[in-house]
Structure formats: C-alpha cells, structure tokens
Image (spheres, rainbow, N blue to C red):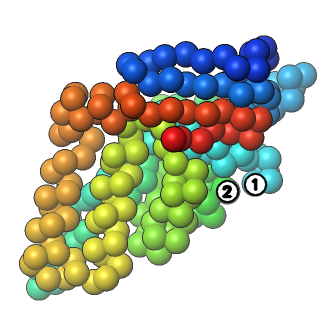
C-alpha cells in the first residue's frame, strides 16, 4: 500500500467542478507522492519530519481531520470551559499517519479512539494558536472544511484576548460552535467551493 502518484499531465490541463476551474501546471510526482515508487511504506510507523510535505499535511486534514469547539463544564465563574481541538482518526494499520502529524506539528496526543481506530488530538491553547492556525493560514485547506477552520480561528482569537471569560465572549463562541461541521447547510458548503480556482505546481497548490 502506498500513496497514489499522478504521473502524466500535459502542461495546461484543467477540469471543472461545480463551476470551479482546477488548473494543473507542470505537475510533479512530489506534490502527490510521499514515498519512493520502489518502496512500500509501512503505515504503522512514522517518518522523519523532514520527509513530510506541508501540503500533504493539509490534504490529510482536508480529507480526514475535524475542527472542534467543545463546551465543557467548569468550576469557574461562567461554569463553562472552552476547548478548541483538531482531531484526526485512522485505522490502527495506518497509525503512522497520526505520528507523522504529531512529528510535523510537534504537538498532539495519539490515543485509542475505538477498538480498531487511533486518533490524534491537538487541544492545548498554545498549540492551536501557535502551530495549527499558522499552518493552515500558510497552507490553506481546499474543501469546505476551511469554513470550520475559519470558525475555529475566530473562536481562538476570542480566547487569545481572554474574552471567553466574560458572558459576551462565551456566548459568541457558543454561537460559532452552532455553525460548525454537520450544522452547516448544503448550500453553504457547496457555494464555498464552486467559485474557487486551484493552481497546482510541483510543490503543491494555491487557491485564488
């Protein structure tokens, strides 16, 4: 088992998806493959950090990740605690992907999710603010999952300013949580992507 490799594209191929034009420029295998064609990767093991392409990280999160705002009970004045999280789940035979993400970001815990699944969770405030948000700002998500990232980012800014400690800030974060993930409408998800143009080069992709 290994990552798929796109080998042959003409210099100016393009495809259209829901009104979006995806332009492919001089695609290199490096943008899609993270292992040598002659090698079979053991997905139960992690790789060295310098072997991990940041665009690959974004792609994994786009496909498998989840941004979460959790509201937890607390003994503080507001009786509620805010937890901002990035979570990715994989089958046990692919746990190496989770360790790749842990090595790349330098944070997060890999824990058992269910009988045959493992999960990485990043939830420390400093890690969300200083590692997760900068990465996805510099290497943006492509799918409608970007909407959930932007919502999490907005909540994180409220937390960073300490405004979550007062009722107004807390209510704002609760309102943001109510917009995320399965609570988004189909129209919102579809419209987010349909007008994007994605340019791919030998290093990765850019959104216009």
The total of numbered circles placed on residues is 2
Identify the mark at residue 103; answer none if there is no mark: 2
Q: Residue 40 in the image: x percent, y percent?
A: 81, 25
Mark 1: which secondary structure? Answer: helix
Q: Quadrant of residue 58?
A: top right
Question: Which residue shows up at 66% across the image and 25% down it?
Answer: 24
Question: Which residue shows up at 21% across the image and 77% down it?
Answer: 164
165 versus 145 height, above or below: below
Q: Out of 40 and 127, give the one closest to the viewer.
A: 127
Q: Out of 188 and 179, give the one closest to the viewer.
A: 188
Question: Which residue shows up at 39% across the image and 21% down it?
Answer: 19
136 versus 112 height, above or below: below
Q: Residue 70 in the image: x percent, y percent?
A: 25, 59
Q: Is residue 190 left or right of residue 86?
A: left
- CB atoms at circles 1 and 2 under 8 Å apart? yes
Q: Is residue 115 visible?
A: no
Binning the other alpha carbons within 10 Å of mark 2 as few (below 14), some (14 to 19) or many (20 upward) gives: some
Q: Is residue 195 left or right of residue 16?
A: left
Q: Quadrant of residue 115?
A: top left
Name the residue that disc number 1 marks: 49
Q: Quadrant of residue 26?
A: top right
Identify the mark at residue 38; answer none if there is no mark: none
Q: Is residue 171 visible?
A: yes
Question: Which residue shows up at 67% across the image and 56% down it?
Answer: 103
Binning the other alpha carbons within 10 Å of mark 1 as few (below 14), some (14 to 19) or many (20 upward) gives: some
């Amino acid at each position: 088992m290994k990552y798929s490799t796109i080998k042959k594209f003409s210099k100016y191929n393009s495809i259209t998806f829901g009104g979006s034009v995806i332009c492919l420029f001089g695609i290199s295998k490096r943008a899609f493959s993270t292992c040598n064609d002659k090698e079979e990767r053991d997905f139960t093991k992690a790789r060295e950090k310098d072997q991990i392409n940041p665009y690959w990280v974004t792609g994994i999160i786009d496909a498998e990740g989840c941004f979460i705002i959790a509201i937890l009970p607390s003994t503080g004045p507001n009786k509620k605690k805010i937890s901002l999280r990035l979570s990715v789940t994989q089958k046990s035979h692919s746990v190496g992907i989770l360790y790749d993400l842990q090595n790349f970001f330098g944070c997060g815990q890999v824990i058992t999710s269910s009988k045959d699944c493992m999960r990485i969770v990043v939830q420390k405030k400093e890690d969300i603010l200083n590692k997760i948000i900068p990465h996805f700002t510099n290497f943006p998500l492509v799918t409608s999952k970007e909407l959930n990232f932007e919502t999490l980012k907005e909540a994180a800014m409220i937390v960073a300013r300490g405004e979550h400690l007062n009722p107004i800030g807390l209510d704002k974060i609760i309102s943001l949580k109510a917009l995320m993930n399965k609570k988004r409408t189909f129209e919102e998800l579809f419209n987010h992507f349909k007008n994007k143009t994605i340019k791919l080069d030998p290093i990765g992709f850019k959104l216009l």
